[in-house]
Amino acid sequence: MTVTASLRSNRWRVIRRSATFWVGGFIVLMWVVFAVFGDFVTPYDPQGTPQDLLTRLQPPSAEHWFGTDSLGRDVLSRVLAGARRVLTVSLSATLLGTIAGTTLGLVIGYFGGIVDDIISRVLDAFLSIPLVITGMLALAALGANELGVIIVIGLVFTPIIAKTVRAAVLGERQLDYVTAAQLRKENPFYVLFVEILPNVFGVVIVEFTVRLGYAIFTVLALSFLGFGIEPSIPDWGLMINQHRGQLTGNIWWPVLFPSLAIASLVVGVNLLADAMSQAFE
Amino acid sequence: MTNESAVSSQPVLEVENLAIQYKIGTDWKTAVRDINFTIGPGESYGLVGESGCGKTTIAMAIMHYLSRNGRVSEGSIRLNGHEFVDLSRRQLRDARVNDISMVYQDPGTSLNPSLRIGAQVADVFELLGVPKGQHRDRVIEILKKVQIADPVRVVERYPHQLSGGMLQRVVIAMAIASEPALLVLDEPTTGLDATVEAEVLDLVAGLRHEIGTSVLFISHNLAVIRKMCDRTCVLYAGRMMAEGPTEEIFTEPRHPYTVGLLRCLPNPDAGSRDEMSLDTIPGFLPPLGAEIPGCVYADRCAMSEDICIEVEPGLNDVGGGRVSRCHFPDEAPNLPRTVAADPVERVKSGQTLVEIKGASKTFMQDGHPVYALSNIDLEIKVGETVGLVGESGSGKSTLAKVLLGIHTPDDGTVITLSGDELASELERRGQEEIGAVQMVFQNPDSALNRRHSVHRIIGRAVQLLRGGRRNEREERIKSLLREVRMGMQHYNSKPRQLSGGLKQRVAIARAFAGSPALVVCDEPTSALDVSVQAAIINLLSELQVEENVAYLFISHDLNVVRYIADRVAVMYLGRLMEVGTSDRVFSGPNHPYTEALLSASPELGEDKRIRLEGEIPEPSNPPSGCVFQTRCPRKIGEICETVEPELVEAEPGWFKRCHIPVEELRAMQMGSSA
């Protein structure tokens, strides 16, 4: 009795006590702040001004901590401003995939039978296609804008999340509270979203944070490859792509700093995901 | 019971001043303290108590299996005179191989699912240093010793291919292979069917005499402990409350907790619920590590006085080798009742409420039919309780689910409610019909949505089964809570904030939301502690009178069925084998299957001793003739194998499905019990 009674408070205690959570949370929060308030904190205009062309490819210095790029724009400003795009696109995509995947997982897990068999096989087939390649193909066909990127990543995540949620729902469906709901002729929408969903929400949260890490990688990989991005918008993937040719000329700063930004954000999100799965699983 | 075994010199196990702590958060909290007992050679010692009393903790400490956040903080455990608390890893390993073995509750998790039985048992002989060439012979020998009929075939099997009873035999075989000085059995039969439990208990008792090992037997089941142990210790909240020779502990208890526990159990001698209501133990177990200056039981004890709250009593000698941790041990037998003994008055109308006719249910499994129910006729009258008993797999739950509309029965099944035919599918039943037939589940943890408040759980059922405006529904929720004797302080609680008994009350309130005429109770008390069980049974009895509701009461606990049921139906392999009034069924003579069930019950079975062999046949391939003939100890001959007997009314109101005439059954059964 006492064990179950303290389960929820325990969960938050586990999270609060976890160094992983605080470190990951700090890193992610930092990038979220830059994404939201980027315009106020960037030392220079990330889009650059015509005068910038006079100060092209300068190494890190007191004025330009991270140096300047091939158009003379401040790399620090562009890195900070770049957080907005990657975060909005990957968060939207993950949110889309989580909502669609959770709904699909609830439905096939609860109703089971032939619907489950067919959809699960289709999902398996879907899962066997590599993410970036699917994304490139779909974007090439759909036209490469941000909405396209969000939809493509969301759709690719849907079956992955659906399968995880389905497994959790299968466990819940065995429990008698679901039978009790049937015994009062409960409507399926209530059973799925009011009875079962709150009990699998931990799984959904864990899945969301794990997927967010992958989404960030995918968004940046696609923009590195030139998909779904307008060249003027500050974006880490694009920055790396535009300057990777100059690495051989010992011009490392326009590549290194966006790379570090990517690494820190992905590590931060993954730390959060670890903390969540420790608490919820 | 064998007391003479305790005379020999050196005790096998000596536990002295044992205290065990668990780390909760940053603090070490004492779970168990001041435990002292010894087990002599060949002696069987019982630890009994409700959940949370510390019995498994003690066993784990003895075995060095405490979880990482647990430690022995004080005291000593000596095995054959050698200190056992601070052993090196090597010494511990040797001790586990040679001197001490343990059998756990669930045999399914004690065995490796991916290894054959033979290989797993052979591992034990490997550890014992038996040469490889002899392994197979030794394995088969030890399996024979635990009465596995066909050991040559069993060694080739994987665990999932064997039944629970068979697996527990294998685990016991592995435990006794080294002929250990001490065998620890932790709830070894909990979760097994009563018939299987009886066999396993017989086996343990037999082996104990054969190899002379000492036994530490842990159980929550007083009847099992009473049957199996020479001496017993009653634990409560990590403290020894009473200790002494088992018979005296149970027949002349000198501690109010023991007295209270025994009164909570339905007892054939005390009569059914029309004669006497059960006594209960109010209140809750103190939380782990609570600092209690006085007696830990004082706040639940009906005879506690000021001194009990202020001063903790010592273990007082109360004569006959017994000790009792009570200030007033001599007054314990006169413990005042907490519940009035007067039963609730009932008026039985005798009108038919539900009539099930020709109910059959066939499942299709991989293209093969599985006959789960076969032609069941059963009548339930207004306001009566029909007990439904049988081993697991006998079709009790399937019958309940057909009645509830969860399973759609085969064509030809007719179920009527108050004379009107009830649609077989839930979807086609109207709101009133659905509200009229409800269910209370076995495990409230599973039956209540752990994310929903009491208010939502009951409120949603009221909304769908009864309807009405919002304020009317609120009134109904409150009156339901009052009916199940719950205070308004629980209105917004989540299930995790409630004790097991309170959770079951919420589940009962939900079932009564639509003013049902029939409630199916599927083992409603078997997941609860004894003291809580009594309160729930009393509640169900009282509600039955207040609401004039009928119960279909499924239970494996025959004493509970005997106490609460007006009539009893016995099922085997999807068929009714015997139906009759509770008095008639429990006084006999019975269908041979019922006889076996009654014999298997540790409380009831003292004088009737027949045992069933083998397992329930596959329902996809039922035996020819009488379905029970393959296991029947009373089989009379060929007719049993060729002709399936009908369920006939052999006496007024008593039905049996057996070829043997009632007079012959009487001669066989009453004769063998004399």
Image (cartoon, coloured by chain):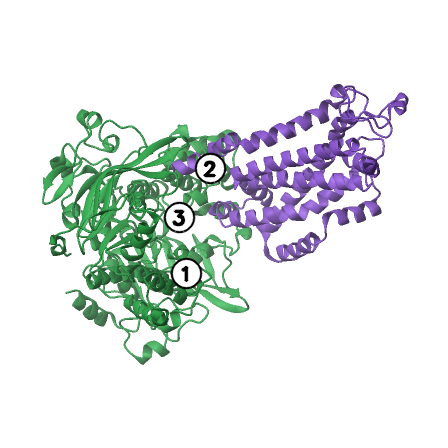
Where is mark 1, residue-wise? Answer: B395
Where is mark 3, residue-wise? Answer: B442
In space, the residues marked 3 and 2 are separated at their CA atoms by 18 Å
Relative image position of residue B106 (x, y in whole percent) = 37, 54
- Please say if B110 is above or below B278: below
Q: Earlier in the sequence, mark 1 or mark 3?
A: 1
Packing grade of label 2 (10 A; few <14, some 14-19, many >=20) is many
Where is mark 2, residue-wise? Answer: B458
In space, the residues marked 1 and 3 are separated at their CA atoms by 16 Å
- Quadrant hosting residue B314: top left
Amino acid type assigned to the residue bearing label 2 in the image: Ile
Residue B36 visible somewhere in the drawing: yes
Q: Earlier in the sequence, mark 1 or mark 2?
A: 1
Q: Are marks 3 and 2 in contact (CB under 8 Å)?
A: no
Amino acid type assigned to the residue bearing label 3 in the image: Gln
Task: Answer with left or right where residue B17 lies relative to residue B380.
Answer: left
- Secondary structure beneath disc 1? loop
Relative image position of residue A263 (x, y in whole percent) = 68, 36
Residue B598 visible somewhere in the drawing: no
- Colour applied to chain A: purple
| Chain letter of the residue carrying label 2 | B
- Secondary structure beneath disc 3? loop
- Colour applied to chain B: green
| Chain letter of the residue carrying label 3 | B
